[in-house]
Image (cartoon, helix red, strand yellow):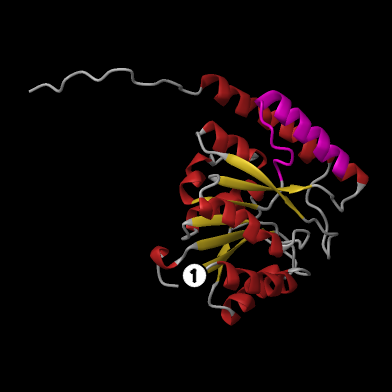
Amino acid sequence: MSGRDDVELSLVLPVYDECESLRTLLDEILPVLEDLAPAYEVVFVDDGSQDGSSAQLDELARLHPTVRVLRLDRNHGLSAALHCGFRAARGEILAMMDSDGQLDPRDLPSLVDVVRRGDADMACGWRRERHDSFVKRASSRVANSFRNLRTSSSIRDVTCPLKAFRRDVRDAFLPFDGMHRFLPTLAEMAGFSVVEVPVRHRPRRGGTSKYGVWNRVFRGMVDLRAIRWMQRRRLSYRVVSVGEEES
C-alpha cells in the first residue's frame, strides 16, 4: 500500500514484550481484515520490547506486505505507543487493540461497521465478561466507576483496548502520558459521538500484565485531575450574529 488514499482501515497494536502471542494473533487478524476492508494495514508499535518481539515483528513485516512496524527508542508506555501509531496510520478509519491476544479480532467488524455507517464517530469495546484476576477486575471496576463519576461519562469500559474511530477523532487525543485511559472522554469533549459495543474477552496466552493496582487505579486518579481541569476550562461558545464584512 503506497499511500494514505489506498488505505481504508488501519489497525494499531502497541507491543511491549508480547513475543508469545504475536504470530498467532496476526494469523487471526489478517482473515478478518481481508473480509472487512478492501485496503488495510496492520501497524505494530514496538515500545522498547526486550523479549524478542522486535525480531518477530520484523519477520512478520517481511512475510506480510500489509504489516508495518514502528519502533520506539525505548519503553515509553502505552500512551506514547498509541499516539505514535495513530499519527502514522494512513486509514480513513482507525482501530486499535492490544497484542496480548485477550481480545478477539472477530469483534473488529462490529465496531468498524458502526463508524463506517456513521452511527457514531467512535465505537468502544465493552468487555462484559472479563477473564482476568479478581484484583485486576476489581481495580478496573473502581477506576472506571470513579472516572465516570468525575467526568459525567456513561462509558462502562473506558479502557477497553478494542476501539474504532474516524480519522479526525485522533486529533482529540492529547500527547500526554496517561491519556490512553481517557480516549472516549477526550473524544466526547471534542464533540464526537461515542458508543459501546459488547466484545469478547479471553484469558492471556502468554506474557504478563503490565498494569497493577498502582498504575491502574492510583495513577489513573492523578491523571483524572488533568481531565477535570480541561473539562472545566474548555472553551464553549456559539456565534449568534455575524457583522457585515467591511468593504
In the shown orientation, is residue 143 left or right of residue 11? right
Q: Is residue 164 left or right of residue 49?
A: left
Residue lying furthest right? 134
The chief SS type of the magenta part is helix
Residue 53 in which image quadrant: bottom right
Magenta segment includes 168: no
Using the rendered view, name the quadrant where residue 94 is placed: bottom right
On screen, 87 above or below 134? below
User: Against 100, is 159 above or below?
Assistant: above
Type of amino acid at the residue the image marks with label 1: Ala
Q: Residue 173: give x, y in percent of width and height.
A: 54, 41
Q: Residue at x 49, y 53 (%)?
A: 87
The x and y percentages for residue 203 are: 86, 59
What's the magenta region?
137-159
Q: Residue visible at 61% across and 35% down?
A: 185
Q: Residue at x 65, y 60 (%)?
A: 108
Q: Front-most of 143 and 9?
A: 9
The picture places residue 230, in percent across and down from the top left corner, at 55, 25
Residue 43, compared with residue 183, is above or below; it is below
- Where is the N terminus found, in terms of image quarters? bottom left
The residue under the point 58% across, 61% down is: 11
Residue 43, visible in the rendered structure: yes
Where residue 73 sits: x, y (%)? Answer: 59, 58
